[in-house]
Amino acid sequence: MSAQTGSAAQASRAQPVRYGSMSRSRRWALRWSYFFLVLFAAFFLLPPFYMLITSLKTSAEISAATNPWWVFSPTLENYIELLTTDQYLVFFRNSALVSLIVVTLTMVISVPAAFALSRMKFWGSATLATGVFLTYLVPETLLFIPLFKIFAEVRNLTGIELINNWWVLLILYPTLTVPFCTWIMIGYFASIPKELDEAALIDGATWMQTLTKIFIPVALPGLIAATIFAFTVSWAQFLYPLAFTTSTDQLVLPVGIVTTLIKGDVFNWGQIMTGALLGAAPPLVIYAFLMDYYIAGLTAGATKG
Amino acid sequence: MSQTAQASSVAVPRRTMRQWLKRPSTIAFLMTLPLILLIGLLVLYPAGYAIHLATLNKGMTRFVGFGNFEFLFGRETFWMVVKQSCIFAITAVVFKAIIGFVVAHFVHNIPSKGQRKWRGMLLVPWVIPPAMSTLAWLWLFDPSYSAFNWVLAQFGADPVPWTGDAYWARFSVILVNIWIGSPFFMIMYLAALKSVPDQLYEAALIDGANWWQRIWYITLPMMRNIIAITALFSLIVTFANFDIVRILTAGGPLDLTHVFATWSFLVGIESGDIPLGASVSLFMMPFLAIAAVIILRDVVKRGSQA
């Protein structure tokens, strides 16, 4: 009996019905894909979701033995408290200032450099391009100790106090953002057809005009991707501010939240989660609106040669 | 003609200067000058200075040669840090690569209309600043209020000491790293998957290849480059990671989760022994250099192919 149905099924599969069976297996593959995607999405979105839940709770509810995955009496208390205290607003202002200035500096340094490296051959240009890529691979964890000592020496020599001022980060962050931005801009600029800038040069445009009138408009998506990257890195950087700034009025958000909201052994988790969520908001908002540029920049970094 | 122009301009220095400024190579040099200064002063010089610092004594008054390294080799904590850094980096990268590969396939499988939405959702961990998301994990792992332990308790299981016990703490820091990093792999692999021509799969299907053979003989060889480069890239970043370990365990319990970055921070900045901290962080250099050389070879190779 079973052999009969088996052979019948085989017969039906061997004949024109084959297409139907393929689409059926395709349908199952699709269902499984959705099933696992839901599982992975749950895993990936769990911590931010839990941040949101905790941020809506009162301290009493957080320490109660109720279901932690549900808010029984939602309140905006944490948000109001954080956004009305000067301290948190100072962190936010420091972060915003540092990130915006670093993004500007990065673009001013890396766009002309990328243009020169991708189009104008000069002595050592190939070596420099490779050097830019290698610099991008140097992590900040390798440099913070010598830089700390160098800055202390600068103070001894000139009397300029660099350490424990928020603007010291303006010197430090470009070491992380400039190499990467230059690297992906070289990639974007190199993909622009040579005929375009040759025509401009023949028409009598200067190099500067070629850059501002042709390269920047044509490579605008790359420019946006690089800008987003520079902003995200500056906003998220944790080691440099932790090592180089200590006074509460000089801290940026990530360090501010970690060091000031955790007071001794007393963790005010409602406020910490609120602070962390608000701190994660700017990159998330930018990402939500400019996702395609963000992803283009991400893949360009390692794939474009 | 240009020769005569040059010869005549020697008499007038201002014109020479202007001519020099008009030469493409000069303009190019000036355009890259800020970049060169930045790399030279803030990357190369500190890197060299670190080597110099590592040969000084704690007060930075006396040259001790390899004294700091000898001291480190004699300390058990140092070897623990080496071991933990390697375990941390390798395990995390392997799992990130596997999860990224699998999730990229699932996203690739569904109709392209919905892919953007899923991709957007799955990349969220990569977008949140690691310091912020690690705080959320720290709260999820809280010794007394852990939300995971609450769920476990509903099933009658014992609470897990997520950051209190040495093995669980290692598991936790790796888990958080995987959570943050696998979306990056997913995006890279998804881009690579899209570049594999469909005809190859169609031909394989006609030849009767099953899904495993299709992955093994088509997908993996076609994606080999991107898999290697992403993994090496991530290996560098993970090996030098600081944020996650610092916030989640601060190296504890009993220094068992320290990696190079967190330990050198503790030794160099918090304990004030800058030369010893520099020596610790210098140990990252050979590992990173090997990875960098391999990546660079690949990048240069593909650059010449294009």
Image (spheres, rainbow, N blue to C red):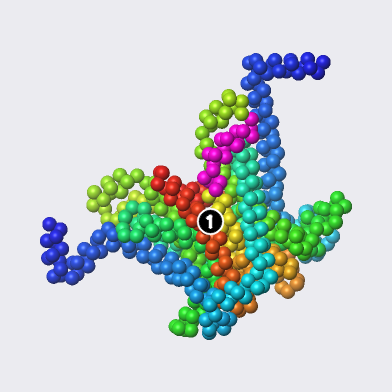
Please give the name of the residue rendered at 82% of the width and 56% of the height, measured from the top-left corner. B150
Q: Is residue B290 magenta?
A: no
Percent x, y of residue B151: 81, 53
**In this rendering, position of residue A278 left or right of residue A114:** right
Q: Which residue is mark 1?
A: B291
**In this rendering, position of residue A49 left or right of residue B22:** right
Amino acid under disc 1: Ala
Task: Look at the image and tell me in which quarter the C terminus of chain B lies.
Answer: top left
Residue B262 vs residue B24, the one in the foreground: B262
Q: What is the quadrant of residue A182 in the picture?
A: bottom left
Please give the name of the residue rendered at 63% of the width and 32% of the height, measured from the top-left corner. B211
Q: Is residue B216 magenta?
A: yes
Residue A49 vs residue A55, the one in the foreground: A49
Please give the name of the residue rendered at 24% of the width and 61% of the height, measured from the top-left corner. B22
Residues in magenta, as a range: B210-228
Residue B66 vs residue B58, the one in the foreground: B66
Residue A187 vs residue B294, the one in the foreground: B294
